[in-house]
Amino acid sequence: MHVEPREPKSPRDDAPPPSLPVMKTPPEIRVRRIHRRDLNRAWDFLKLCFRDVNRDTVEYQRPRSKNRFLEVYEEEGIEQLIFETKIGKKDVIIGYAECAFEVVGSDNWINVRYFTKREMRPLFVEELAVHPEMQGQGIGAFVLEQLEHLARVRGCTHLVLEVAENNDNALRFYRTRNFFKLDAAIFLAKKVPVEDELLPPRRMKCAPPREVVVALHDAATTPKRKNGSPRKKARERSERDFGSHATGSVRAHRGPRPAKKD
């Protein structure tokens, strides 16, 4: 999950296009459930949000492909929320959240018994994204508040999400909002020197007995019996069937051609 709160940006020197009025008051953020017509815009939004963070993480912090994202929309038990604001006359996506009230998907590695044993009823936050140019405006806090509201009304006791350990901004955001680490699992790696694929020669532990050496030597030096080439076998069969003139034309085995009658 990727949320990087910052201090509000200072106003830019370049003025907005003439068709867009200057905002004198902070714009309003509206939340709604995703619609099929939103899928392309939402996918482009996620690519924009996670473009930089995915360069530095082992796992993708969003669906790996658009096809998978479209499949999520069709799955039962998953909530996809769009957070929009009005820019001019257009509704612009500035936030996205995806959550599930139970473990879904055939490729999910969540261990349900972990939560059952601890009497936890989690709301699983699959995605949480804020527009890179709109961070520090309270959008992430509003998204998280909406998810907590869903958890309360559905009887969930915890929000559970995954965040990359090297995503310092996201970790800071969640920890200041009372999130704590559930599991100590992390990705580990060990550098292996680059070498040839095949190992170098190695001596046996001891020399084999003489009789073993003789047997191995004889097996390696005994010439194999040759059965002949397929063409030679075919020629031998023809000679057996037609006689010694098998290599000539078929007419040679039928006898002389009868003379034509006048």
Image: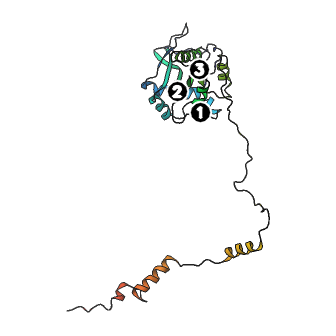
Give SS at disc 3.
strand
Question: Under tag 1, what secondary structure?
Answer: loop
Residue 247 visible (yes or no): no
* Pointer 3 with pointer 1, Cβ within 8 A: no
Please state which of the two labelled residues, at mark 3 or mark 1, is closer to the viewer: 3
Give the answer, above or below, for where 201 lies relative to 124.
Answer: below
Residue 174 vs residue 261: left or right?
right
User: Residue placed at 73% from the left, 51% from the top?
Assistant: 195
Distance, label 1 to label 2, CA atoms, is 21 Å
Q: Which mark is residue 102?
A: 2
Distance from label 3 to label 1 (Cα)?
24 Å
For residue 137, side relative to residue 231 (left or right): right
Precedes in sequence: disc 2 or disc 3: 2
Image quadrant in which you'd find residue 169? top right
Cβ atoms under marks 2 and 3 closer than 8 Å: no
Would you call the spot at circle 1 few (<14 residues within 10 Å), some (14-19), or many (20 or more)?
A: some
Q: Amino acid at mark 2?
A: Glu
**Who is closer to the viewer here, 249 or 222?**
222
Mark-to-mark CA distance, 2 and 3 = 12 Å
User: Along the line of sight, which residue is nearer the eye, 144 or 25?
Assistant: 144
Vertical comparison of 186 with 176: above or below: below
Residue contact between numbered discs 1 and 2, judged by CB atoms under 8 Å: no
Label 3 crowd bin: few (<14), some (14–19), many (20+), radius 10 Å: some
Q: Nearer the viewer, mark 1 or mark 2?
A: 2
Residue with the most extreme right position: 206
* Horizontal and vertical percent position of residue 255: 33, 91
- Quadrant of the drawing holding the N terminus: top right
Residue designated by label 3: 158
Q: Position of residue 86 (x, y in %)?
A: 49, 14
Query: Which label number is shown at residue 29?
Result: none
Label 2: how many Cα within 10 Å (few below 14, some 14–19, many 20+): some
Q: Which label is found at residue 60? A: 1
